[in-house]
């Protein structure tokens, strides 16, 4: 079951313990990765009913243990507040009863979606009579490295479980207690369903060197790495990883308000896109307004944002609408604020809006507000982002809102998966060939 001879010399049954020093960290990480590899083999063959039983138990455990999760999270939040964390960071870290309910609801949704493993996506017959099928299979062992948002532990855990993958979770040190409390619920579900507990493994140390070891692939035990965090984390993972990476780059997202937009709709969408939760990756960071609509829409939009407590940094035209607007620098057009700040610019029509997005965007999520269907079609076709929207908030950039139940991240690359990475996107495929004795001439 284990791929490498190195694993034969390791104690695969001893309890994993948190390691504070680097001396034993390599052994710790090698052991947990080897256990995950063994669990992946079991999970890849587990029937849908068994996986769903585990998911049902996980949902129940999260709801039952919500008080313990909240208590652990309160300790994490108190610690980061004492260390001077920003309000946006605290918001990303904080769990509330409603957020825990949403976490559990996401597990239920994942349980309800069809099992992607074993699905035959294509089937055809060759002239020689052989039948060829392309069938979905798990990726293997997924390592998820994330920062601050403890709900990622649950999202990643259940999505990997549903798709037959083992997962190694390495949360940020700021959410260490919260992740442990959530992980306890995940393990309880695996245990009740008779699945190996190593199928969902939480790295039991805050030691940052653990990330570097994960990036090596741990002697081939890890098949893919998913980073969830800021630009520096993603950049490091992409630069150092020796295994494939599902890139989740920063969300420099735009809302373009066309001259043919309904003002009330535009105001509602812009306010939600920026201020619903400014710290999430789907939050809008730049507002683009068509010059033809400046006289009717610019001032109401800017004043609305300012009155809602959002700092607006604008070009010269935007600055003229309100004395509270600060001048935008060149860096503002390329910045993911993750805070109640937005850059605003007037553009000369749709083509300039698209050009601005291509130059400054991160290929994550961009939206147009317009009643002109032709303009909407052009925007949706030409903006090269993982998610493009017409007359809807960028905050719908979320696997749960796509009906996936949860997401392991928003992939902004172009290979294998793009956009919200759900259970189906965590599978690869293989070919099954059925013959009747054919040989190749």
Image (cartoon, rainbow, N blue to C red):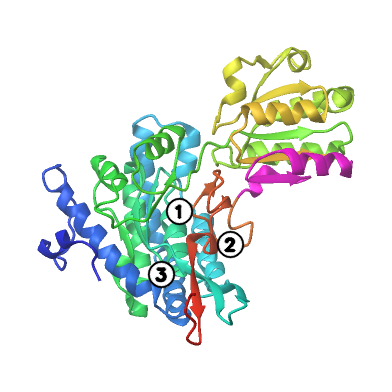
Front residue (pair 148, 78) = 148
Locate residue 389: give its quadrant.
top right
- As drawn, 387 above or below 128: above
| Residue located beneath label 3 in the image | 61
Q: Quadrant of residue 328?
A: top right
Q: Is 388 in the magenta? A: yes
Whether residue 211 is situated above or below residue 336 in the rendered picture: below
Residue ID at (58%, 34%): 362
- The span picked out in magenta is 371-397
Q: How far apart are labels 2 and 1 at the CA level?
A: 15 Å
Percent coordinates x, y for residue 222 in the rendering:
32, 55
Of labels 1 and 3, earlier in sequence is 3
Q: Residue at x 63, y 56 (%)?
A: 401
Give the Cα distance between marks 3 and 2: 21 Å
Q: Which residue is mark 2?
A: 404
Who's the residue at 78% across and 36% down the image? Answer: 267
Tell me, yes or no, if residue 114 can be seen here.
no
In primary-sequence order, the first of circles 3 and 2 is 3
Q: Are marks 1 and 3 in contact (CB under 8 Å)?
A: no
Query: Which one is closest to the eye, mark 3 or mark 2?
Result: 2
- Residue hosting label 1: 151
- Are the residues at dot 3 and dot 2 in contact (C-beta closer than 8 Å)? no
């Amino acid at each position: 079951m284990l791929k490498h001879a190195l694993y034969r010399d390791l104690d695969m049954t001893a309890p994993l313990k948190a390691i504070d020093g680097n001396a034993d960290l390599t052994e710790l990480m090698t052991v947990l990765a080897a256990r995950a590899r063994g669990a992946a083999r079991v999970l890849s063959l587990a029937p849908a009913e068994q996986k769903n039983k585990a998911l049902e138990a996980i949902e129940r455990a999260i709801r039952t243990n919500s008080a313990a999760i909240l208590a652990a999270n309160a300790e994490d939040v108190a610690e980061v507040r004492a260390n001077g964390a920003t309000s946006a960071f605290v918001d990303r870290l904080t769990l509330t009863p409603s957020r825990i309910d949403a976490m559990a609801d996401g597990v239920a949704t994942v349980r309800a979606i069809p099992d992607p493993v074993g699905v035959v996506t294509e089937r055809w017959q060759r002239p020689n009579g052989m039948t060829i099928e392309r069938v979905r299979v798990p990726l293997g062992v997924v390592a998820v490295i994330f920062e601050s948002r403890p709900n990622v532990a649950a999202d990643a855990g259940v999505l990997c479980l549903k798709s037959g993958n083992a997962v190694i979770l390495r949360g940020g040190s700021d959410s260490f207690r919260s992740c442990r409390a959530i992980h306890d619920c995940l393990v309880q579900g695996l245990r009740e369903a008779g699945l190996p507990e190593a199928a969902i493994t939480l790295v039991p140390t805050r030691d940052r060197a653990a990330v570097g070891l994960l990036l090596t692939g741990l002697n081939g035990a890890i098949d893919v790495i998913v980073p969830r965090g800021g630009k520096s984390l993603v950049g490091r993972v992409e630069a150092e990883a020796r295994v494939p990476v599902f890139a989740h780059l920063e969300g420099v997202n735009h809302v373009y308000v066309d001259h043919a937009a309904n003002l009330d709709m535009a105001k509602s969408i812009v306010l939600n896109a920026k201020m619903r939760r400014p710290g999430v990756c789907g939050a809008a960071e730049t507002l683009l307004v068509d010059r033809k609509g400046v006289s009717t829409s610019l001032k109401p939009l800017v004043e609305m944002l300012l009155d809602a407590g959002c700092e607006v940094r604008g070009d010269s035209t935007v600055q003229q609408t309100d004395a509270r607007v600060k001048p935008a620098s060149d860096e503002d057009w390329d910045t993911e604020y993750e805070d109640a700040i937005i850059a605003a610019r007037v553009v000369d029509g749709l083509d300039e809006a698209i050009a601005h997005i291509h130059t400054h965007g991160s290929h994550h999520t961009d939206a147009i507000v317009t009643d002109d269907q032709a303009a909407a079609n052009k925007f949706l076709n030409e903006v090269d982002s993982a998610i493009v929207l017409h007359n809807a908030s960028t905050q719908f950039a979320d696997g749960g809102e796509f009906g996936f139940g949860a997401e392991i991240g928003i992939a902004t690359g172009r290979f294998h998966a793009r956009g919200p990475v759900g259970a189906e996107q965590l599978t690869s495929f293989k070919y099954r060939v059925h013959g009747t004795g054919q040989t190749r001439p």
